[in-house]
Image (cartoon, rainbow, N blue to C red):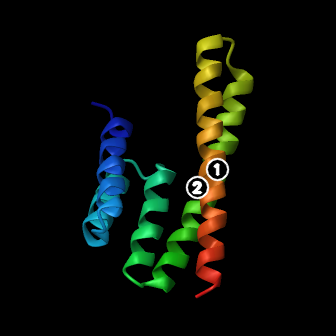
């Protein structure tokens, strides 16, 4: 199993823990996700959400800034990779990643707004 795959598994665990109102457990899973594959911007976002649920707004803001920079970097990289691949199947993969990172940036924008209202 590749690190990115293991990271995705931890990301799914963190998501479920947030959905079941267990932010401490979500934070632990998100941290494991990042130890496995730091570039997983989705796990950075989940850390923000866990910090918000734990009412740790200053840590949420710090994590949000990291998530924002990383999601933008990942988006730029996916766009570059898409433009350089001659393979149509890989192009579709990069298009899906681009949509994922764009959605993450929308989530980051919403979280930033939520934190500014606190």
Residue shown at 67%/18% (left/top)?
A: 85
Residue shown at 59%/13% (left/top)?
A: 89
Query: How far is disc 2 from disc 1 in space, using C-alphas?
Result: 5 Å
Is the C-beta separation of discs 2 and 1 under 8 Å? yes
- Image mark for residue 41: none
Badge 2 local density, few (<14 within 10 Å), some, or many (20+)? Answer: many
Residue shown at 45%/68% (left/top)?
A: 49
Residue 112 point in image, percent of width and height: 63, 73
Question: Is 69 displayed left or right of 13 in the figure?
Answer: right
Q: Quadrant of the N terminus?
A: top left
Q: List the residue tagged with mark 1.
A: 73
Q: Quadrant of the C terminus?
A: bottom right
Question: Is 79 displayed left or right of 34 in the figure?
Answer: right
- Asked if residue 5 is positioned above or below residue 18 in the image, the reply reads above
Residue 53 point in image, percent of width and height: 40, 76
Which quarter of the picture shows residue 26?
bottom left
Q: Closer to the camera, 21 or 91?
A: 21
Residue 100 point in image, percent of width and height: 59, 41
Count of residue discs: 2
**What residue occupies the far front of the structure in this picture?**
20
Q: Secondary structure at mark 1?
A: helix
**What residue occupies the far right of the structure in this picture?**
83
Badge 1 local density, few (<14 within 10 Å), some, or many (20+)? Answer: some
Residue 14 point in image, percent of width and height: 33, 56
In this view of the protein, can residue 35 be seen by the observer? no
Question: Is 72 displayed left or right of 16 in the figure?
Answer: right
Q: Secondary structure at mark 2?
A: helix
Residue shown at 27%/68% (left/top)?
A: 22
Q: List the residue tagged with mark 2.
A: 70
In this view of the protein, can residue 6 be seen by the observer? yes
Which quarter of the picture shows residue 80?
top right
């Amino acid at each position: 199993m590749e690190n990115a795959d293991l990271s995705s598994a931890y990301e799914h665990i963190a998501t479920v823990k947030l959905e079941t109102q267990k932010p401490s457990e979500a934070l632990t899973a998100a941290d494991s996700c990042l130890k496995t594959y730091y570039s997983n911007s989705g796990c950075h976002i989940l850390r923000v959400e866990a910090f918000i649920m734990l009412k740790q707004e200053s840590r949420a803001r710090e994590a949000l800034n990291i998530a924002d920079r990383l999601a933008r970097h990942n988006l730029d990289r996916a766009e570059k990779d898409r433009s350089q691949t001659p393979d149509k199947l890989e192009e579709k993969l990069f298009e899906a990643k681009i949509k994922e990172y764009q959605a993450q940036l929308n989530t980051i924008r919403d979280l930033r707004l939520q934190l500014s209202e606190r």
